[in-house]
Image (tube, rainbow, N blue to C red):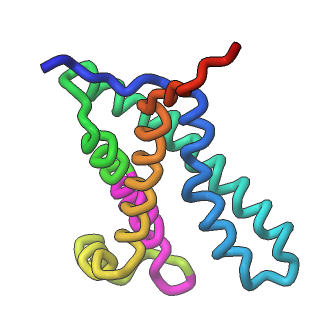
Amino acid sequence: MARRIVPLSWRALLLAPLVISVPAAVLLASGSRVPIAAFAMFALISYLFTLATMGCLFLPALWLAGRVGSVGTWLPLVIGGLIAALIFLAWDYISWCSSGVDSGPPATTYQRWVAKSLFTPEPFVAITFGVITAAAYNFLATRTPNPSKDPAP
């Protein structure tokens, strides 16, 4: 079996974050008094965050996975989901640290906090966003152009 490495594609790197950023910005800006400005702000912030995450975490992890073995279709999705889960845990830890009275020390242990927060929709949404973004990158980076039936003159 030949090793398959997902190539670095600038087009895929720049377009894949839009798959989640634009719909999320539409949902977040829908109740605003100035929806166009809110959409632009939310889209830009989420695009830059997703782009930085892909460039600094996802692509190096995908490169390391390609050095170790063959990267199938499912491996980028797993890597995207794991990175999203780690980002959720970091965000959850920050929330726990400021969960006390007047944003002070937490009143419960982190293990209890995680056990409670794992049964909310947020981890599912975060992991789903990571998998969808990784799938978009994998699709855009590995697809081959369809040769046209009629060649240009």
Q: Is residue 98 above or below residue 68?
A: below
Q: Is residue 143 above or below residue 50?
A: above
Q: Quadrant of the N terminus?
A: top left
Q: Point out residue 49 in the picture as x, y percentages from the top left corner.
A: 60, 49
Q: Point out residue 38 in the picture as x, y percentages from the top left corner.
A: 79, 69
Pick the front one: 128 or 153: 153
- Residue name at image x 49 percent, y 40 percent: 54
Q: Is residue 60 magenta?
A: no
Q: Quadrant of the C terminus?
A: top right
- Residue name at image x 32 percent, y 23 percent: 5
Q: Residue furthest top?
A: 153
Magenta stretch, residue numbers:
84-102
Pick the front one: 128 or 136: 136
Pick the front one: 93 or 136: 136
Image quadrant where residue 34 sits: bottom right
The chief SS type of the magenta part is: helix
Image quadrant where residue 41 sits: bottom right
Residue 91 falls left or right of residue 63: right
Q: Is residue 70 above or below residue 48?
A: above
- Residue name at image x 31 percent, y 51 percent: 82
Q: Point out residue 148 in the picture as x, y percentages from the top left corner.
A: 55, 27
Pick the front one: 38 or 119: 38
- Residue name at image x 43 percent, y 55 percent: 132
Residue 38 falls left or right of residue 66: right
